[in-house]
Structure formats: structure tokens, C-alpha cells
Image: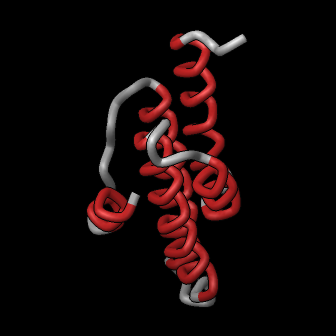
């Protein structure tokens, strides 16, 4: 039996939060297993989470610089916020990362 539209929407909303929580790891999983035709919105957020994860990983390597650790934590929290907003149906496009994700999702 096919899932109803509201069930599919609820599943996608939960996936949006999870995608940003684990950033690039969960973003890659969602991106690979989501069909572009069926859900462009989820594919966009998965790619945006992957890119944010890459930025956070690079900044994490620079955490020997005193304020870089704090910046990394703030970006991770921002990612969770974006995932929550995406789960609510609000489309937040991150600066620089979001534009790239919109073009390639």
C-alpha cells in the first residue's frame, strides 16, 4: 500500500532533522537514497547538510585556534536549527553553501 501524502511529508520532516543532526554522514545517506524526481526538497537539505558538515570538519581541524572550537559548536547548532526549520516546512538557504546546494540538488 502506498504511503499517503501526509505520511510521506512526516517522514521527510523527520529526515530533515536527522540529516542536519549528523551533518555530512547522514546527509550522504539521505542524498544517495533519495530520488531527485520524488523529493527535491529533501535532496537539497541533504546536500546542504553535507556541505555544512565539510565546513565544520575543516574548522574542527583548526580547533587549536582558541575561538575556532566555539565557532564549530555554533555552526553545528545552526545546522540543527536549519534542520528543525526544514521539518516545519520553512526553507532556509544558508549563505554560500545554500546557493551551491540549490544549483546541484
97 lies left or right of 50: left
Q: Is residue 39 visible?
A: yes
Find residue 89 and report its image quarter. top left
> How are the colours assigned in the image?
secondary structure
Find residue 3 and report its image quarter. top right
Q: Position of residue 23 (x, y in %)?
A: 61, 58
Name the residue at 57% across, 49% down.
20
97 lies left or right of 52: left
Q: Nearer the viewer, residue 33 or 48?
A: 33
Q: Nearer the viewer, residue 97 or 38?
A: 38
Q: How many marks?
A: 0
Find residue 14 and report its image quarter. top right
18 is higher (above) or lower (below) than 27: above
Q: Residue furthest front?
A: 1
Q: Is residue 74 visible?
A: no
Name the residue at 44% across, 24% down.
88
Name the residue at 55% across, 88% down.
65
Q: Nearer the viewer, residue 67 or 42?
A: 42
Q: Position of residue 36 (x, y in %)?
A: 47, 48
38 lies left or right of 25: left
Which quadrant holds the C terminus?
bottom left
Name the residue at 42% across, 33% down.
85
Q: Position of residue 16 (x, y in %)?
A: 55, 38
Amino acid at each position: 500500500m502506498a504511503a499517503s501524502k501526509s505520511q510521506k511529508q512526516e517522514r521527510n520532516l523527520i529526515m530533515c532533522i536527522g540529516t542536519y543532526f549528523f551533518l555530512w554522514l547522514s546527509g550522504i545517506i539521505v542524498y544517495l537514497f533519495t530520488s531527485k524526481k520524488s523529493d527535491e526538497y529533501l535532496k537539497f537539505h541533504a546536500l546542504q547538510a553535507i556541505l555544512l558538515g565539510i565546513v565544520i570538519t575543516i574548522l574542527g581541524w583548526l580547533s587549536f585556534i582558541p575561538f575556532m572550537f566555539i565557532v564549530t559548536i555554533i555552526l553545528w547548532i545552526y545546522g540543527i536549527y536549519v534542520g528543525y526549520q526544514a521539518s516545519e516546512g520553512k526553507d532556509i538557504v544558508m549563505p554560500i553553501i545554500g546557493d551551491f546546494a540549490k544549483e546541484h540538488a
